[in-house]
Image: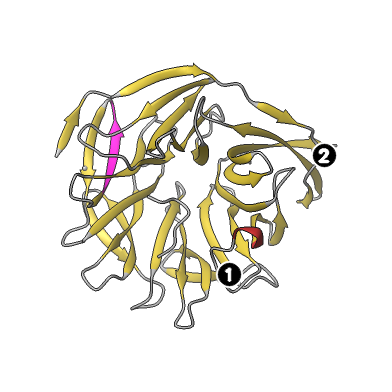
Amino acid sequence: MSNAKARMSRFHGIGLAVAVLLVALLVPAALASLAAQGRVITYSYTNIDFPGALITFAFGINDQGTQIVGNYFDSNFDRHGFLLSDGTFSTVDVPGGTFDNSVNHINNRGQIVGQYADSGGVYHGYLLADGIFTTIDFPGAEHSFADGINNRGQIVGEYLDSDGVDHGFLLCDGAFTTIAPIEGTDTGALGVNDPGQIVGFYFDSAGISHGYLLSHGVFTTIDFPGAVHTLVYGNNNNDEIVGRYVTDSNVNRSSAQHAFLLTSGNFITVDPPGWTGRAIASDINNRGQIAGLFRDAAGRHGFLATPVENR
């Protein structure tokens, strides 16, 4: 399964290495406008680059708007998780993990979920809460990934079974539930809001990806108009959904990938300025701020898109 969030025994100690202050690039506003609920909204974009990193991806944002998580690649092309809080970057790597770590989401309580690879190459999801890492492994799975957490502590993610098929899951009150819009096809559960609505994507029998919303036990397919592939990654409590759409039959073709927002029934492309390929909207908070990643002529960056309302 091709997941943009390329991805717990209990570990003590928060394991955060404090880096330098954020030096963000604020690009001009008026770069993405949309009509939503009778208002015109303009986004201002800020690039997110971990100091000294080759590549930075932003995956999750909470309602504070100043806490963003994701991963970055160092000079050896090892991947590390990070937390950006009030302008300061910190590395978040699971003790005992290897060269491949990621932080995928953060809630308003500061609880973090992500994944790491162990020395045997097996991926495990994890929860970091109150400085303690806890492993999240779906029972019997080959690999597990934790992708989203809401303010109630419900966690969603995906696991790979022994047949090589990806499935979404919900972890609630210690119990795992498989999320599968269509049995037997690759599925990921990537985001969950406080009412418990889950978003993600699945591949159909023809290899085409579709986004979905699971609400009150009912799956609704989400397809960006005119796109070949649609993949959904995040949602908020205001029925707003973000993801990416692909205009090529190859879901991984970088030049054909665009970030989108679905709000009030309207699909809007929200590619950052300077986009040259692979823009992904990874998460949206309840203030309408979007975290994501994109590529421009200078490289690959995370981004924060903050709405500015014009009255």
Viewer-proximal residue among 24 and 34: 24
Cα distance in 3D space between marks 2 and 1: 28 Å
Q: Residue at x 36, y 70 (%)?
A: 180
Q: Residue at x 55, y 26 (%)?
A: 66
Q: Residue at x 31, y 71 (%)?
A: 165
Q: Position of residue 134 (x, y in %)?
A: 22, 38
Task: Find the residue positioned furthest to the front.
Answer: 76
Q: Is residue 253 above or below residue 9?
A: below
Q: Which residue is mark 2?
A: 30
Q: Which residues are magenta?
A: 124-130
Left or right: 304 with respect to 110?
right
Q: Is residue 55 above or below residue 33?
A: above
Q: Position of residue 27 (x, y in %)?
A: 74, 32
Left or right: 121 with respect to 188?
left
Kind of residue at badge 1? His
The answer to if 170 sits in the magenta stretch is no
Q: Is residue 112 above or below residue 280?
A: above
Q: Which residue is mark 1?
A: 229
